[in-house]
Image (cartoon, rainbow, N blue to C red):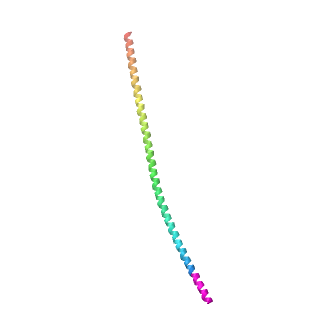
Amino acid sequence: QTIDRQKKKMENKQRRKEEDKKEIEEIKELIIKFMKQTQEEMEAQRGMIQAQSKKLNQLEQSVQLFHNRMDSLQQLEMMKRQSEIIKEIKEETERNLDIKIKEEGKIQQDL
């Protein structure tokens, strides 16, 4: 009986050991599966972040182009206004010159 009991004990011990081994293997598999899934999710997120970063860079470039165009338009407006002012000054100068010439012509006639 003692030998049978010891034998049963050993068998139970061995069975528990094998069950524990199986359980450990299942846990390992679950951990590996979870790690793979986590890695895939991280790669997907990395891809999304890269796409968003690319879109952001394109948007920044568009904004820069817009600012450059606005600056160019402002410069053109300023040049147009300067041209108008120069034209006005020229016309005013020509009028004043005509008046002077007429006045001098009168003075010459009077003399």
Q: Residue 4: where, in percent of width, then height?
A: 60, 88
Residue at point 59%, 85% (across, down) = 8
Is residue 8 located in the magenta-colored stretch of the structure?
Answer: yes
- How many numbered badges does the structure rendering display? 0
Residue sticking out furthest to the bottom: 1
> Looking at this view, is 30 or 86 the one in front?
30
Question: Does residue 66 lie above or below 41 as drawn?
Answer: above
Identified at 40% across, 30% down, the residue is: 84
How far across and down, in percent of the image, does residue 23 sit?
A: 54, 75
Direction top: furthest residue: 111
* Residue 2 position by quadrant: bottom right
Q: Nearer the viewer, residue 68 or 35?
A: 35
Above or below: residue 79 compared with residue 59: above
- Residue in front for this viewpoint, 80 or 97: 80
What main secondary structure does the magenta stretch of the protein show?
Answer: helix
Query: The C terminus is located in which quarter?
Result: top left
Indicate left or right for 3 with 35 as reference: right
Q: What stretch is highlighted in magenta?
A: 1-14
Q: In which quarter of the image is residue 100?
A: top left
**Residue under the image location 37 percent in, 16 percent down:** 102
Could you say which quadrant of the image residue 14 lies in? bottom right
Where residue 90 sits: x, y (%)?
Answer: 40, 25
The answer to which of 52 and 99 lies nearer the viewer is 52
The N terminus: image quadrant:
bottom right
* Residue at x-position 61% and y-position 87%: 5
In the rendered image, residue 22, in percent from the top left (x then y), is placed at 53, 76
Using the image, determine if residue 72 lies above or below residue 103. Answer: below
Tell me if residue 69 comes above or below residue 52 in the rendering: above
Q: Is residue 40 magenta?
A: no
